[in-house]
Structure formats: C-alpha cells, structure tokens
Image: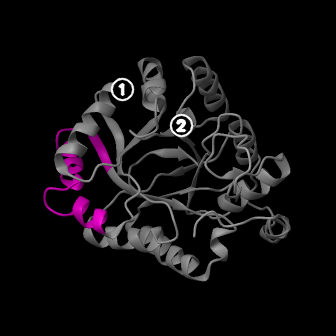
Amino acid sequence: MIQRLAFGRTGHQSSRTIFGAAAFMNVTQGEADRTLEALLEHGVNHIDVAASYGDAELRIGPWMDRYRDRFFLATKTGDRSYQEARDSIHRSLERLRVSAIDLIQLHNLVDPIEWDQALSPGGALEAAIEAREQGLVRFIGVTGHGMSTAAMHLRSLERFDLDSVLLPYSYVVMQDAKYAADFGRLIERCRSRNVAVQTIKSIALRPWWGRERSTTTWYEPLQEQADIDAAVQWVMANPNVFLNTASDTRLLPKVLDAAERFNTEGSGERLDEHLAALDLTPIFV
C-alpha cells in the first residue's frame, strides 16, 4: 500500500500519491471503473479532478454512490469572477453526484491579471468562501503550471489563508535556480502554516516537439518502469509533498507501482544519477 501523510491542516491522511483525474478527459466509464480497482488496490484515497477535465467529473460521479467515504475529493474551477465560479462549483457537485466536496481549488492561478481578478472583491475566491460557509466545500486551495507558479502561490498565501497549493516539482524543473529558490520559500511557508503541497509533472521527459503523441499527457512522459521509479521516488523523497499522477490511465499502474515500492531510506544520490543520465528537457519556458 502507498504511504499516507497528513494533508495539511485538513485532518485527512492522504495517500502520498494522489489520483490526477485529468486522465479521465476522454475515457469510457468502463475504463474509469477499471482504474478505480487499481486505486483501491494500491490504497489511493485522494482524487484530484477539475471542471475543465472533459468528462472526468462525470466518470467519477458513479463511484461516489458506493465509495464517497473512501476518498478525499477535490475539484477545481478555472473561472475568475464570483458568479462564474459559483456556477462552476454547483455544476461540479452535480456532475460528481455529491452534496459536498472536500477541496475546491482556483485552477492555474498564475497570470497576474487573472490572479488579481480572482482574489479581489467580486472574484472567484468569494464564491469559494461562500461555498465553504454553505457546507458545499470544506477547504480552499490554488493550483498553477509554469515557472512563475511558486512565486505566485507565495503571493496567494499572503492574500488568503489557503489550505493547499499545487505546482510543478521534478528533478528537471528544480535544476532552474530561480524556480528552486521560489519553491524552497514556498515549502517553508507551507510548513509554517500547515498547508498541503501537491506536485505535478513528475514523469515529464520533454515536450512532444512535433512527434506523434503516444499518450494523453500534453508532454512526452517517461515510460520505462525504471525511469518512472526514479522520477516518482525522487519526488516522494521530499517528505513535505504529495505526487499527483499523470494524465494517462495506461501510465497509472507504473506510477502507482513506483510509489508503492518507495523506500524512505533509498539513495537520493542514486536517483539523481539515474535522472541526470536521461534526456530530460524542461517542458516550461
């Protein structure tokens, strides 16, 4: 079974590996249900979905009739105004077939103009707070992609007392000195406030760069088990973070297997050497 860790101040012991339901963007219910079996087998008890992930919320909805109490359920809204975000949250509840979710996240909040709109009066944050007051959500977080994300999350934490953040974290992204410094400051801020830190893009290899896509991830991923092992376990070696799985159901078993075999006494130096030998290329510019 995959290790568990307190998800910030929420009181929930979440699996260190969180199911990234972007993998359900365009799958059948049958494929989704087979994925559920794998999640239960490995002890994954936390789902991260979003309103913008195609049919993903609809695929998770049927699970909730039987397994709502087995999962910490998080979704996201990419809307920036109060009314649009409010509508999005209520629509997600309907699609997920639940009366409440555990975590609502303001999705990809890194553009300064959108950031100001969402966190100002009349913005999406007001809808999230209202939903929390109404018992529709329990906690509020923020997510982001790209190299400015850590710095923007620090700004968000200054503006509002968030319960979680989500951002890129991998061997290759941490080779960027500025991002690594911003990430380090963010981790310390989150530790001091007991804010959960979720990470994405752990198994990114490089951009597709015109090659024919063989997976549903928007970047070309690592695919060999030994390479995925190194990438996943490199992330999990940081005891302060969670790892959200990649957006392809075919890669999920390999990621879950790597996470389940993670050993806290493993060699960080060995993982660095393995990953340094790969042709890892930053997917963000």
Q: Name the residue at 52% across, 70% down.
A: 147
Can you identify the residue that label 1 sits on?
95
Can you identify the residue that label 2 sits on?
45
Question: Does the stretch in magenta take in 129?
Answer: yes
As displayed, is residue 142 above or below residue 171? Answer: above
Amino acid beneath label 1 = Arg
Q: Farthest residue toward the front?
A: 210
- x%, y% of residue 102? 36, 41
Mark pair 2, 1: CA separation = 20 Å
The boundaries of the magenta stretch are: 113-139
Q: Sort mark 1 into few (<14), some (14-19) or many (20+) by Cα contacts within 10 Å.
A: some
- x%, y% of residue 220? 70, 51
Amino acid beneath label 2 = Asn
Q: Is residue 136 visible?
A: no
The label on residue 22 is: none
Where is the C terminus found, in terms of image quarters?
Answer: bottom right
Q: Name the residue at 63% across, 69% down.
A: 173
Q: Nearer the viewer, residue 265 or 186?
A: 186
Q: Is 23 on the left or on the right of 107, as rendered?
A: right
Question: Does the stretch in magenta take in 228?
Answer: no
Q: Name the residue at 26% across, 65% down.
A: 160
- x%, y% of residue 256? 70, 41
Q: Is 131 on the left or on the right of 66, as rendered?
A: left
As displayed, is residue 203 above or below residue 186? Answer: above
Nearest to N terminus: mark 2 or mark 1: 2
